[in-house]
Every structure is written in C-alpha cells, then in structure tokens.
Image: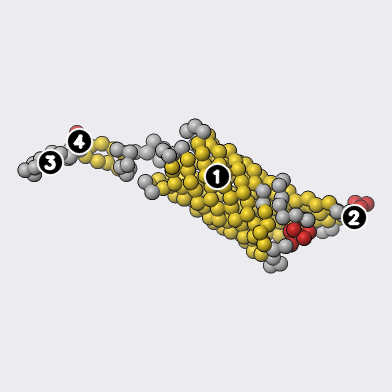
Amino acid sequence: MKKLEVGKYHFYAQDASGLHSEANAGSEFNIKFKKWLDFDIEAGYTCPLILHDDTFPTYFGTMAYPLSAQFRLSLMPFKQRWGYLGLGTRVSFSRLDYEADRYRLDGNLLNLHALFIYQLPLFRRRAIFELHGGAGITYFNDIKYHFPHGIESKPLNTTSLSFDAGLAVQIYINKRLYVEVGGDYILALNSDMVLGSIQPSAGVGWQF
C-alpha cells in the first residue's frame, strides 16, 4: 500500500472464469499523503572559500571568510515516488575584515539566490538527499579602507549576477526538526572579476 501513487482506487476481484466484482462506492479507497506540502525553514553556518580569482585573497589576505551565516526557505508542493520538486531561496552573509600595519579594509558580502529543488526521501523519510540550483545576485556592500586619523575611502557597493549549484543532506531528529549539512558552489560575474567560491554549510531546520 505504501508504494501506491496518490489517487482513487477500487478493490477488484476476478476468478478464473472471468467473473469480477464491480467498481462502486463500496469498493473505493483513496491514497493520500499525510502532508501534501512541505515548507522548510533552516538557518546555520557557512564559510566561503575562494576557488578562483585572486582579487579577494589579495586584498583581504585570505581565501576563507569564517564570519558567515546562511538562511534557507524551501517550498515542496510536488511529491511523487521518485522524489519531491519545489522552489526555494538561499541567502548567505559574510563579514569581511582585514587589518594591515597602516590601514584596515572591511565590508560585507551578500549572496541571494532563487533555487529549483529536487529532494529524494531515504530510509522511510528519516533522511532527505537534495540537489538545488538557480540564479540570483552577489552584493559587495560598503567595502572601504580605513586609515589613521579617521580617513576613509569611498565605499564600494556593487551588485553582480551570480549562480548557485549545491547539494545537501537532511537528517530528521523527529517529524519536524532536522539537521542539514551541504555545500554550494557560487559563481559571481562582475566586470572586473569572475569570482568562484564554495560554501560548505551546516544548519538546523524546521518543517511546517
């Protein structure tokens, strides 16, 4: 019974001679999902690692930016035996901060993407494997130099088209609460650089 698709069915019996029962209201039964729609909210930690383009490592002195966090929303309305399909969004924020002998450079990096999502339930839905991908923006916010005596450079604020592709695994602690580990590759296209980074992540979510 658990393998049947969602829909209306009739119990049907037939003997060797071809006689069979009739389909009527008394023989009808329905197969329904207990939840036809999943809505997930998840927040957690991420740490962007620059894979190519040396602009950020050159100016900020590192390839990793650990002062970061992420937030995700997922809406999964299409459920079939072969998996779930839905839409979502992912936001990640990183604080950039580098201090040299005679100056300090800081700012913010924001990624916002709309995602197409595929999920495959495993082990009677105690775990979910997910693939997702989509497009959005990468926002370089308030990046500026600070010099002695209160002197500052003009802040850099620019928005770039970017793309996100990633995977995740969700492990359910109970029917609603889950933990998630995953990773995303983000490619930001700017007139001065093509910034590619990977963002491993871990978080906690709740399904409504």
Residue 20 spot, x, y in % from top left:
11, 41
Q: Secondary structure at mark 1?
A: strand
State which tag comes first along the sequence, 3 or 2. Answer: 3
Name the amino acid, label 4: Ser
Mark sitting earlier along the chain (1/2): 1
Which of label 4 and label 3 is nearer to you? 3
Which residue corresponds to mark 3? 14
Snapshot quadrant of residue 14: top left
Q: Is residue 44 left or right of residue 153?
A: left
Tell me, for residue 102, which label it has, or none: 2
Q: Residues within 10 Å of mark 2 (few under 14, many from 20)?
A: few
Circles 4 and 3, Cβ within 8 Å, touching? The answer is no
Q: Are marks 4 and 2 in contact (CB under 8 Å)?
A: no
The residue positioned 39% from the left and 36% from the top of the image is 34
Tags 3 and 2 touching, CB below 8 Å? no
| Residue 188 in which image quadrant | bottom right
> Is 39 on the left or on the right of 113, as rendered?
left
Amino acid found under the numbered disc labelled 2: Arg
Label 2 secondary element: loop
**Which residue is denoted by mark 1 in the rendering?**
73
Task: Please report the residue visible at 32 percent of the width from the left and 44 percent of the height from the top.
Answer: 5
